[in-house]
Image (cartoon, grey):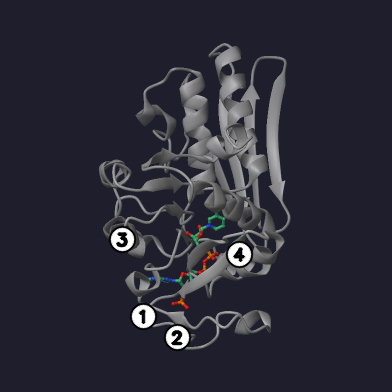
Amino acid sequence: MQKTRAVIVGVTGRMGQALLRTAPEFADLAITGAVASAHSPSLGRDAGEPAGRRLGIAVTADLPATLGTADVVVDFSQPQAALAHLSACRAAGKPLLIGTTGFAPQLSEAELEAASRDIALLVAPNTSLGVTLLAELVRIAARALPPQFDIEILEKHHRMKSDAPSGTALALARSAAEGRNLPAGEATAAVGASRTGPRRQGEIGFAVMRGGDVVGEHEVWFAGLGERLSLSHQATDRAIFARGALRAALWLARQPAGRYTMRDILFKNQ
Ligand SMILES: NC(=O)c1ccc[n+]([C@@H]2O[C@H](COP(=O)([O-])OP(=O)(O)OC[C@H]3O[C@@H](n4cnc5c(N)ncnc54)[C@H](OP(=O)(O)O)[C@@H]3O)[C@@H](O)[C@H]2O)c1
């Protein structure tokens, strides 16, 4: 069996290491490239070193040089580098899964759309299969319940997380907006707004908590008069994001150029 060859960008980070630990669960996957920043203290070292096992792949900052033999690229790195990574994959014609979050405005929707005409592209602010299903359930609930049900999204993450609200919270808001047939801008209109006075009907609100080592918790609240529905997901192990990302990468490597989402992995992966 020919294995699917994947390059991991951001390999020295929390997610990069989780991807390396999880990769052996996929018999048809081989990690063939390990990329970090040009300032990484790990350059030239074996990518498996932090986890205490040799992989025989040296960490490099030269993404284009790793792409020749790659079938797919999995990027969990830094928002500032997102455009450069997209351009390198597009130039080499390699499918790309972007797990990095918080890259707007460095990388615009127009650039993503343009790239997806040349390569298979999957942008996933959350690669957990459970969260992917949560987004579907939120879309259904938002469509079914009348607009008098207020929608609030609560998210909790570890103290090191730099973006807020989380990419997942924003994606859940977009699902809710789609369910209600609201214009895309309405999903995130309340981001950063301080709340005083009565709640505006139709607004999708956000609440953010940061602390300790919380891997990621999201709760979507549909609050009516006299009843409340709450849909939630708790991640207790970063491995769920890695497992979902690698499953998606295996799928993406076989797709023609186009724009894909984690929803495709759940519902078109039969
Ligand atoms: N989609 C999801 O399900 C999901 C889940 C969790 C996290 N995330 C997102 O994934 C990203 C990474 O998270 P993390 O917790 O793993 O962060 P992290 O621990 O800070 O790791 C960041 C990684 O990116 C590398 N890096 C930095 N600048 C780079 C550049 N210019 N080129 C190539 N590599 C570069 C770093 O390498 P050096 O420092 O060694 O250079 C490091 O390996 C974040 O955006 C986070 O929000 C997404």
Please, which residue is most extreme toward the front here? 1
Q: Nearer the viewer, mark 4 or mark 3?
A: 3
Q: Nearer the viewer, mark 1 or mark 3?
A: 3
- Give, as a three-letter code, the residue at label 4: Leu
The foreground one among 143 and 51 is 51
Q: Nearer the viewer, mark 1 or mark 4?
A: 4
- Give, as a three-letter code, the residue at label 2: Leu
Which residue was labeled with disc 3? 92
Q: Is residue 85 left or right of residue 99?
A: left
- Sequence-wise, the earlier of marks 4 and 2 is 4
Q: Does the residue at mark 4 contact the one at mark 2 (Cβ under 8 Å)?
A: no
| Element under disc 2 | loop
| Element under disc 3 | helix
**Is the shortest distance between ligand 1 and the CB of mark 4 under 8 Å?**
no
Q: How far separated are the C-alphas under marks 2 and 3? A: 23 Å
Which residue was labeled with disc 2? 43
What residue lies at 66% left-to-right and 57% top-to-bottom? 215
- Sequence-wise, the earlier of marks 1 and 4 is 4
Q: Is residue 115 left or right of residue 29?
A: left
Which residue was labeled with disc 1? 38
- Give, as a three-letter code, the residue at label 3: Ala
Q: Does the residue at mark 4 contact the one at mark 3 (Cβ under 8 Å)?
A: no
What residue lies at 61% left-to-right and 51% top-to-bottom? 247
- Give, as a three-letter code, the residue at label 1: Ala
Which residue was labeled with disc 4? 19
- Sequence-wise, the earlier of marks 2 and 3 is 2
Q: How far separated are the C-alphas under marks 1 and 3? A: 20 Å
What residue lies at 63% left-to-right and 24% top-to-bottom? 222
